[in-house]
Amino acid sequence: MRTLLKTIFWLGSGLVLLLFVVILWASFGSVQKQRRTSDDPRYAAEGQKAVEEFLRTDAPSVLKQLGATNDLGSFLNLEGSGFLHPVWNVQGYHFLDLRRTARFDRGEVPVRILVTEGRVTAPGLESVGKPKIEGGTILVSHPDLHP
């Protein structure tokens, strides 16, 4: 009887400890998520603005690098809103994933923009970096973006 009570006591204590750890982990995750998401819309907007300027100044070269075969004329604007956080991040840096449609005088092109963590992708950066194209995706570093 005594060993049964000891076993129940230790199992109960273990469950209480496990519950405490789970609650603590969830609360830290919630605080981290709130901190991360509070400024992310601003970072996404600033990254998008840099990409719009990039498209406005060098649209033919950008379109060629993105795989567009036709001359679509002058850049008008980017359509779309929102962003995604990386679900599975193997790049080694945090980023925001923006899916947009680039509108030109004579057509449209779907565009994927990654606003990346500047302290990793461009150390020493003090303002939003110059966009570059890699693998059909436009990358732009933001100095304040962090996980």
Image (cartoon, rainbow, N blue to C red):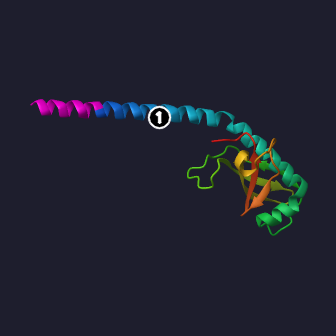
> Which is nearer the eye, 143 or 102?
143
User: Which quadrant does the N terminus fall into?
Assistant: top left
Residue 134 location in percent, x, y? 74, 61
Magenta span has 7? yes
Please state, as top left, top right, bottom left or bottom right, where the C terminus lies in the image.
top right
Residue 2 placement, left or right of 49: left
- Which residue, given by chain and number where applicable, does mark 1 sit on? 26
Please provide the residue range marked out in magenta: 1-13
Q: Is residue 58 visible?
A: yes
- Residue at point 53% right, 33% down? 30
Residue 72 visible in the current orientation: no
Residue lying at the far left of the rendered structure: 1
| Drawn side of residue 40 relative to residue 6, left or right | right
Quadrant of the rendered structure where residue 14 is?
A: top left
The residue located at (85%, 54%) in the rendering is 55
**Magenta stretch prevailing secondary structure:** helix
Q: Position of residue 124 (x, y in %)?
A: 79, 45
Q: How many marks?
A: 1
Is residue 110 shown above or below 67? above
Q: Is residue 85 left or right of residue 121?
A: left
Q: Quadrant of residue 36?
A: top right
- Residue at 82%, 47% (x, y): give it: 50
Which residue: 86% across, 66% down?
Answer: 71
